[in-house]
Image (cartoon, rainbow, N blue to C red):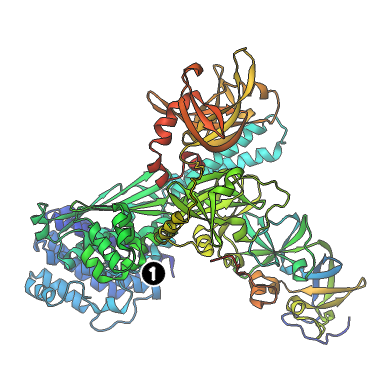
Amino acid sequence: MKMARIAEKNLAQEEVVSLCSLHSGNRLFGVDTREIREVLGAAVPQPVPLAPAYIAGVISYRGNVLTTVSLRALLGMERQSGASCVLVLEDEEPGRQFGLMADGVGSLVTTTASELEANPSTLEARSAAIFDGVYKMQAGLMVRLDPRRLRPLQLARSGLFGNAKQQRGWER
Amino acid sequence: MEDLTQEFLAESREGLERMELCLTELEKRPGDGELVAEIFRAVHTIKGTTGFLGFGRLQTLAHAGETLLAAVRDGKVSVTGELISGLLELRDGLQAILQIIETRGNEGERHTDDDGELIAQLQTLQAGGLPQAAQRDAGRPTDAPPISLRVVENPTARDQSSSTEPQPMAGQAQAGTERTLRIDVVVLNRMMDLVGELVLTRNQILQSRPDAESFPELARRLNGVTTELRDSVMEARMQPVGNLFSKFPRMVRDLALTCGRRVRIEFEGQETGLDKSLLEAVRDPLAHAVRNAVDHGIEPPEERVRAGKPAEGVVRLRAFQQGGSVVIEVIDDGAGILTERVLAKAMERGLVTAEQAAAMTERDALQLLFLPGFSTAKEVTSVSGRGVGMDVVRTNVEHAGGRVELESRAGIGTTVRLRVPLTLAIVPALVVESGGQSFALPQSALTELVRVPHADAGVSVEQIGSSELYRLREGVLPLVRLDRLLGIEPDAGAEPRGFYIAVLELERRRFGLVVDALRPPEEIVVKPLSASLRELGVYSGATVLGNGTLAMILDVAAIAARAGVRPSEETRLAAGEAAQAQSPFAMQAEIVMENSMVLYETAARSEDGVMRSTRMAMPMSAVERIATVPVGEIEYVDGRAVVQYDTELLSLEDDGGVLAEMSPRKGATVTVLICLQPTERGVRKMGVVVRRVLDVCAGTVLAEDAAHGGSALAMIQDRVTALHPGFGGFARFAGFAGFDAHAAGTPTGALQGAA
């Protein structure tokens, strides 16, 4: 293995990283398996009216209500009907989780931190807010996602994905 | 903090609470040696344990107190008002040090004279040297802090009680009692047994298959165990209301001294249980109501004597359980509220016009006291006698899902009634549908349900500007369309039908929420939402419905605010305008609640002896619940069908032979109207098996029809329909005549039936 050129934050050099691959549309993504609590096979989120577009809805997870973020909506793709895969990830509030909905979950990919390439500088703001870098895979590029930046509150704070509080004209 | 210290703090606090109660009691019965012994024990325990834990300052103060108490016990010092005051100050002093220990983990900085003054005072009392104490009392008002320590740290209960301003209780002061809970070992054992039972049932279910013979039996057992477990956990969370009452004797005593009143406090129903979190929620409102009763309700002694009342006023705290809620009443025998003065003040403050005031009933006038404008003005309260922060009381109680009622009779007294639900974690809710989605609507704010048939939707809903109004009885109701509010696209493919209006009332706002359909009420378990969804401010939580889907729980107050619903006093003005703008021809608004009927299909034997399918109706007020019962759960005793409903055995009436049609099929269910049937000996609960429920709608009861064996007929949806024979009388007796009072207070039995 070649020597690390870029020192990644929090990641020791030459550390082996295992990523869970997932796809939305024809795009491939990866999330560090250590960040994933559970992968739910087929989940149908219950839509939440008035919630921002990137919130696919809520699903019931171990007696709790899981707010689920739609990767498709974040990427500006069409909503897909029917069941999707949901990754259960840790939320900001301790002991609480949120869900990340993707079209499907693929195999585990093992790589090293040093192989991560930084986001291209020309990447548009929305994608830059959630993409963590790119791995060159044999099949193509795999975008690494940082679950911390996908947390619903974080997305709301970024202000890039539409405001949660929509005012409606008919109100007096 | 060390466990030992924690335990010591909790125990000492309990001891001090007891001490306070005993002291106020001792003032009434100065000769009671038992009480002195009890107080002595409390102080002695603290002294003993502090020495062991090394809290020297606490020990010194407790020791001084103990010495004085020993003298009292031995009869060397007699019980006087000064002594009681001194000992109460000792209690406060000890409490304040405990508070410091809890927050800092040690006794804090030791200033030279921190406890010195108090100890000196105790010594003076012991020496029988009243002059100094009396002089001190005369020198400053009784509510002035007698020791510096109290000012430095959090205000103690005493300081707060003597203030008439609404103040939140010092959260820290209660912190120690909130974190821990004492549970009867018997209850805990019972819970463990039930959990064991639950595990066994789960094991059996895991080994069984849904089509197994024993499956319905297992499901029933699971149901039973769950219900019992829920009840016992709720029981464990229950705390006697008496815990809340215990601080009032002291508060009333101090307050009466400050205001120059003579007041006795009485309790009733202290053992009534209330969920711990709710107990905390009503703590402040209740204290406020008691404060008001002493401060403004009870007259000065001379005035009372002149009015022919005993010089000593009585404030009575009464708690009892009523249905799914606990009622706590604060009753005083004071001057009552003079409605003329309330109205005069309201007009002066521009809250109502002279015409409105003239038209107001006494009840309406009392409601004005809940207006925020009324509470802040000092001079109003000194004249009208009441109203300090009643809006705060109401807001706090409604936050906890409860209600506040106010009753007053001039010269006789005032009653403030707080009505709170038994628990918050599991609440009865109505499930409504809008735009194809289900939402849960807590029943605490629901007053009634109205169905508007499609044919009437055009005429009964009036437009004023951009807002819609519905004519409900003599008033008008602003409508809020849930789908529009939430931005849900209405089902495009759905054929136009009628809709339902859920009439909601909260914080003086009254409005109708328009929904597409109603589903049976459920007892829902409230699940918290993530911060990002809480931020939306429309939902108070989410829940899993009986069919396994998630539903958002609507926050009624937030919806009212979002839709711009104004408090009812203002709406009444709008109502006047609406009445003037009304079209000349009268509208036929169908009002479900007044003559609401459950319309169902069953079979009846016609004259030629053949069973024919027929429509029948039952008054909604008689129906507690519409249940779906698996046929397998129905058992037969002497040929009579019975079913277990909650914990009781319910006998089923099946005149239409529905069960006979169904029974061969496995897994089949029947619809049962669970209703209360009037009999000679009162009311009995029974189930009526029906083919299906067609509708819940308005109907007019017609005269009894002799040809139909005396059963009553009703006009429903323009068709003559027979009422269920057992309920013809009920319709007239309970259903309609007495309905106004019923509708004003609670939703109908059918909607409450979820419990």
Query: What is the quadrant of residue B573 in the picture?
Result: bottom left
**Residue, disc 1:** B172
Decide which of B249, B685 is in the foreground and name it.
B685
Q: Residue at x 39, y 60 (%)?
A: B569
Residue at the far top in the pictured view: B608
Say whether residue B410 is visible.
Answer: yes
Pointer 1 indicates a residue of which chain? B
Residue at the far front in the pictured view: B584
Decide which of A8, B287 is in the foreground and name it.
B287
**Vertical placement of residue A47 versus A132, above or below:** above
Query: What is the quadrant of residue A66 in the picture?
Result: bottom right
Disc 1 residue type (three-letter): Gln
Q: Where is residue B242 in the image (x, y as percent from the top left)?
A: 31, 52
Query: What is the quadrant of residue B335 in the picture?
Result: bottom left
Image position of B401 (left or right of B355): right
Q: Residue at x 68, y 30 (%)?
A: B668
**Vertical placement of residue A165 versus B152, above or below:** above
Image position of B227 (left or right of B43): right
Q: Residue at x 66, y 41 (%)?
A: B203
| Image quarter (top left, top right, bottom left or bottom right) of the N terminus of chain A | bottom right
